[in-house]
Amino acid sequence: MISVVIPARDEVHAIAGVVRRVGAALAGEAHEILVVDDGSWDGTGAVAREAGARVLTLTGVGYGAAIKAGAAQARGSLLALIDADGTYPEAALPRLLSAVRGGARQAIGARPKLGASEPFARSAVKALFRGAVRWLGGFEAPDLNSGLRVLRTSDLLSLAPVLPDRFSLTTTLTLALAAAGDPIVFLPIDYHARVGRSKWRPVRDTWLMGRTVARGIGWLREGRAPGTLAALELPAVGGTG
């Protein structure tokens, strides 16, 4: 089984469509869709449940903390992450899943480097961080913090102690698993304009991502993952997940 975890806060206008499209994309797979409703005031959880998702209700703990809570409740050995705002193509999930079953430690949907769906300033900041990781850490990452990815549930849970509670969780996942030395696959995806208002805060989130990148570069230069992951054996993943 693959568990799809969708962290959501006040995404009532987008969540039903995301849940239904995820279900359609994985119609040939044993799967579950778990929406982590993190302190919504607009009925996001109820709409997600009506659309067919299992809903975990939290009280506003943050994007990263919501993902960790969802992973802890996941029933599948494989874990997919996707945002609730309609920006990521749900139809890409089977390709990412196939890459992990084919031997990748993690498969990440890589967004276009520049696009109309994201402010130029935000794209420039991410390009700067990608460059730092390439030149200082020796790792080429087309997209450090994509919110669309597939990995093993056990990998995320093993890293939980070092995964941040906010948006820098995805960057940490990318760099920690890269430092482990196992293959990471980046697959190009489309990226759409979000439904509703962005929750990204330029100063706070840029600072948090920068701190995460600096820590990840240290892991890459040392050639090892964080201690919580270093001793983890890579399990075989069968055709049914």
Image (cartoon, rainbow, N blue to C red):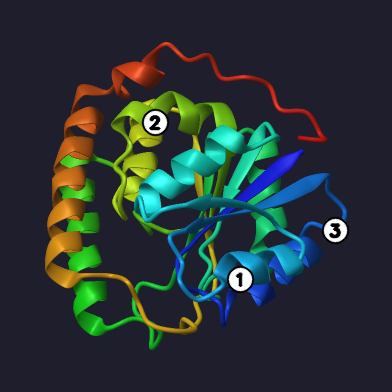
Q: Give the side of residue 73 with respect to residue 52, left or right.
A: left
Q: Position of residue 197 (x, y in %)?
A: 38, 82
Depth order, front residue of 240/7:
7
Graded by Cα atoms within 10 Å as few (under 14), some (14 to 19) or many (20 or more), the crowding at tag 2 reads many
Q: Position of residue 38 (x, y in %)?
A: 45, 57
Quarter where residue 1 is shown: top right
Quarter where residue 118 is shown: bottom left
Quarter where residue 212 is shown: top left
Most extreme residue toward the bottom, as rendered? 116
Q: What SS does tag 3 mark?
A: loop
> How far apart in space, not on screen, are marks 1 and 2 (Cα)?
26 Å
Depth order, front residue of 11/162:
11
Residue wearing tag 2: 160
Most extreme residue toward the right, as rendered? 28
Q: Give the side of residue 103 with respect to residue 128, left or right.
A: right
Q: What SS does tag 2 mark?
A: helix
Graded by Cα atoms within 10 Å as few (under 14), some (14 to 19) or many (20 or more), the crowding at tag 1 reads some
Residue wearing tag 1: 89
Q: Position of residue 133 (x, y in %)?
A: 22, 47
As drawn, 203 above or below 37:
below
Kind of residue sitting beneath label 2: Ala
The answer to the question of whether label 3 and label 1 lie on touching residues, with beta carbons closer than 8 A, is: no
Residue wearing tag 3: 27
Kind of residue sitting beneath label 1: Pro
The residue drawn where x is 44% and y is 48% is 66
The residue drawn where x is 56% and y is 77% is 12
The answer to the question of whether label 1 and label 2 lie on touching residues, with beta carbons closer than 8 A, is: no
As drawn, 26 above or below 218:
below
As drawn, 75 above or below 210:
above
Depth order, front residue of 171/129:
171
Location of the C terminus (image quadrant): top right
Q: Earlier in the sequence, mark 1 or mark 2?
A: 1
